[in-house]
Image (cartoon, rainbow, N blue to C red):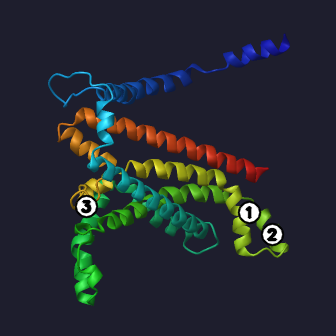
Amino acid sequence: MFRRNNMRQAKKKINFTYYVMVVPMALLFFAFHTIPFLRGVFYSFTDWKGFGSWHFVGLRNYGYMFTNSNIGSAYAFTFKFAIAATILVNVIALLIALGLTSKIKFQNTLKAIYFLPYMLGTLIVGFIFNFVFGNMLPSLGKFLHWGFLETNILGTSHAWIGILIVTVWQGLAFNTLIYMSGLQSVSPDLYEAASLDGVTPWQKFWKITFPLIAPFFTINLVLSVKGYLMVFDQIMAMTSGGPGNSTTSISVLIYNQGFQGSQFAIQSANAVMLFIIVAAISLFQLNVLNKREDRIEN
């Protein structure tokens, strides 16, 4: 009886202000995100071109995706780009975070410098590096007689490497910030005790630091894979998917063919498929990494 009264009192303590803050956001999310998504799922089962009349075609659009070489190439490029970007961003960001949380001079200044790219718009960064790759580096290459710099990399078959460099550079700030939060949560007493036992720096990192920041590693990995599988802005700003279709990601293909190629229904099916893939990979990662965290804690 006493417990029941306490539960009733706890329920009464919920402030109405919370509902005022949460409900409008939930309604806006439903109106501008959920409804368009459901409409996209609906049109993926039709032959609608973005205008005029439409008819139900069942799973025909989904079957078409497996026979179209452009869609297959876009998926191959996107997975290659996402894997490379995820590995590079997380390795470099962890190294930078380790450096910035150690006892070094100008620590705050360096933090500001590393965080600056995150404050710039992706399209602005893309256009700046378009000029760098197209004018500054070729001029420098000719001056130094370095052949590999004389050509604009964005116009070659290695254009994806140029996009990857810019994406990694801009993505480092966010991941570094999360890793720094994790590193600052590790108690210095553990390192002092390890030093007294004669533990080497590598052993400190592998046996103490990395297990304790495992949850932050999980967050970074899941967000990185999800974000890079949907890469769009960097490509549109730097190559628009070219040369040819060599840097066309799934998101770029959906935009180009869906809104400019009269394939609205087919690309709606493509978008639904991309959503399923991203959700499945994210859930798989969370499941595997959470089990790993549990093993470390036990």
Residue 194: which disc?
2
- The answer to whether residue 250 is left or right of residue 284 is left
Q: Compute the Cα span from label 2 to label 3.
A: 48 Å
CB within 8 Å, label 2 to label 3: no
Residue 249 in sight here: no
Callout 2 environment at 10 Å: few (<14), some (14 to 19), or many (20+)?
Answer: some
Quick check: 93 above or below 67?
Answer: below
- The answer to whether residue 143 is left or right of residue 35 is left
Residue 127: which disc?
3
- The answer to whether residue 133 is left or right of residue 177 is left
Q: Quadrant of the N terminus?
A: top right
Quick check: 228 above or below 116?
Answer: above
x, y percent for residue 175: 52, 57
Residue 247: which disc?
none
Foreground residue among 269 and 9: 269
Earlier in the chain: of badge 2 and badge 3, it is 3
Callout 3 environment at 10 Å: few (<14), some (14 to 19), or many (20+)?
Answer: some
Secondary structure beneath label 3: helix
Q: Compute the Cα span from label 2 to label 1.
A: 9 Å
Q: Residue furthest left?
A: 52
Earlier in the chain: of badge 2 and badge 1, it is 2
